[in-house]
Structures are given as C-alpha cells and as structure tokens.
Image (spheres, rainbow, N blue to C red):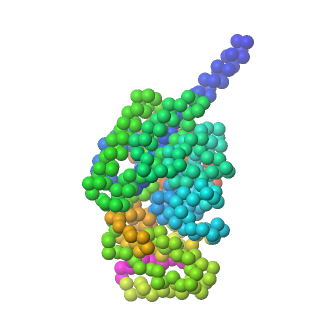
Amino acid sequence: MYLKASIFLCCLSSSVALAKVPLVLLSIDGFAQRYITQYKPKTLMKLMEQGTSAKALLPVYPSKTFPNHLSIITGVYPINHGIVHNAFYHREIEQVYKLGDGKNDQRWLTAEPLWHINEMQGNKSAVYFWPESETPINNQTPSYYFPYKHSTPNKQRLDQIISWLRLPAVERPNFIAGYFASIDDAGHKYGENSPQLITAIHELDDLLANFVAQINQEFNGQVNIVIVSDHGMTKIEKHHVIDWEENIVGNVKAINGSTQLYLYSDNEAELTQSINLFKSKQSNTSDPSYRLYIYEDYPAHWHFNRKNSVIPNAIVEASPSYIFRSKKHYDTAETHGYDPMFNRDIDAIFIATGPDFSTDKQVEPFENIHVLPIISRALGLKDVENIDGKYNIASKIVN
C-alpha cells in the first residue's frame, strides 16, 4: 500500500513539475511599433523591460487584420490558412469572403489555429474574440469562447480572462487569447497624433496595468503574457482615391480590399483586356498610384506562389497613401494593407513576459508566422509539423 501511494505521489509531483504555467495571448489591433517611442505607454514599456520583445513584429502580405491574425494563430502564410485578405473570392464556395464567414462554412479556414492544437493535446483553450475563433475545426470549437461583438468594453474582456484563470485546475484553460480593436478604430478614423488615438492607447495601457497587477497579486506572476499586434498604420491622403471600375471588362470579378484589387476570371481575353486598361492608365506616370501584377509575376515574399481556390489571377496594388474608391462613403485618416516589406509604418509589436521569458531582452525583427512556435514551446506542447513558422526563433525567446 505504501509503495502504491509513493508511486502515485511521485507521478503526481512529476506531472506538476512538467506542467506549464498558463499563457495569455493579447492582440492589440493596429498598434504600430513606432507608437512605443511616440506615445510611451507606461505599461507596455515596463513589460518590455520585464520580458522579451522584438524590435518589430513583421506582418505578412497583405497587411490586413484577418490574414495577419490567422498567420499569428496558425503559424502559416495566408495561402496556407486560406484567409488571403479581409475580402476575397473563393472559386469552389463561389462566394466573396466576409469577416467571420468561417462560422458558416468551415472550408474558408484551411489550417489549424493554436486553440485547436492545444485542445487536441489534451488541454483547454479560451478565446475572448479573435478573427475566425467561431469557426469549428473538425466540428470542434475552443472550450470557452464568445461570439464577436465589437462594442464589448476592453475591461470586460480582460475581466473575463482573469475569471478563466481563477477556474479550478480541471476547468482552467492553459491557453487564453484576447483581441482589442479600440486603437485600430481610432487610428483609422482620426489618425496619428490625434487626441482620440492617444487617448485610446493610454486607456488600454491603463487597463493592462490593472490586469498585470491582478496577475501578480492573485497568481504570483505565474502566468505568461504575450502581447502582439497584427499591423501598424500609415497615413493616406484624402485626394489619393483611385477610380477603377471602368477598367473591369465583362465578367472579371474584382474584389476591392481598399489597398488591393483582387481580380478573378476564367476568361483569359476579358482578364487581359482589364489588365491592359489598368496598365494604360499608368503608362506615362512617373509616380504611379498603383502597380499591377499577374499571377506569374507575384513577388516571392508575398507567398502567393501556388494556384488554389482563393489566389487571384491578378492583383492591382495601391501605392502607399492611395486607396481604391469604394461605393460606400470612405472617410479615413490612416490605413494598412500595403506591402509590409517596404513600409516600416506597418511594423507591429511583440512583447512576452512571464516565467518562461527572459528579462529585458530584445531580439531582431521576425515575421508573425513564428509566433505560434514561440507560444507552443512556452505552453509545453509538442512541436507542430507542417507549418511555415520556425522553432529556431522560439529557441531564442523561450527559456
């Protein structure tokens, strides 16, 4: 009897020793890397000192919210997770994608998000909003999640995360993700250095200060916190609006993503006519408002190099400060979506603090596809195969 008890206690203590502390992933939509030095948010700066940060987190192309959030949470490029823009056409589904469509048809999302990977390894995940977090993967959703509601106060989101951490061990999620859109909203509408943007940054920073204080008080700091953003922002000029509809011939399907037009067509003659019309409008311009690419000429760093149901036949790429005219009234001060390789304004943030991260350490910029390997290592999960993210970066960041 004593031997059995000893074996049980030994196994129990061993499993406790191997158990990883919970990890909270927070995404601040639209928070540019340069906002750290411009606006000096006290909490974020303190967390950088207490943990590990990147000089920049580099978005994937296009630098839109949904493609980048899905690359962060799946560890793959948009061509592999399927969400190649905030709006695009799917040839097999025969529909234009709208934000959150995965909850209605699982075929939109073609890679496994981390909350599902975590559940498949015997854990519980919780998500308080994340792009496509309502999409069932193999008919399974996270153990805990909320349907998206944009107006939900940031404090309510953070309070719920604390409530999840307070759950009994058998119910507690070890991975929690949360999403905040208030800074993106202010950046789009009012722009850089506006009182509204500055207020939004400091209000969220103050909430994070209280959140971290609760973590330290209630859980003795034994929670890893990773804070990311999906992209930064860059200024647009109100008169830099591109008229384009007259260039679309026949049944060519043009999906307007504001900073890109995605062109789809099975009719080669009509597609060629449309392409030539776009080219003719720019042929004598030294500073073009857009550039046009056909599939064969897509830049390698876009990772759009495989024909599938969602990759367009051609892309008309707006130059920074320009956007394509929309039928809806479009009144915005700043935006994102442009090629992140050539726009440092678009750089995002990565900050990680907690028991599994070094103190006051800064690493070189890296693409956001590498965030999943970092988090999965911190969670003690088995390495995920067949992703674009690399675990050698995780080895430099996770203790």
Q: Is residue 387 visible?
A: no
Callout count: 0
293 part of magenta stretch: yes
Q: Residue at x 43, y 67 (%)?
A: 338
Relative vertical location of residue 301 with respect to residue 111 in this rendering, above or below: below
Relative vertical location of residue 29 with respect to residue 50 in this rendering, above or below: below
- Which percent across, then down, holds residue 271? 56, 83
- Which percent across, then down, holds residue 357? 46, 39
Q: Residue at x 57, y 29 (%)?
A: 169
Q: Is residue 190 left or right of residue 70?
A: left
**Magenta region: which residues?**
286-294
Of residues 215 and 12, the one drawn nearer to the viewer in this rendering: 215
Of residues 276 and 358, the one drawn nearer to the viewer in this rendering: 276
What quarter of the picture does the N terminus occupy?
top right
Q: Is residue 58 left or right of residue 169?
A: left
Q: Is residue 373 left or right of residue 219?
A: right
Q: Residue at x 48, y 76 (%)?
A: 316
- Which percent across, then down, holds residue 254? 52, 75
Q: Quadrant of residue 360?
A: top left
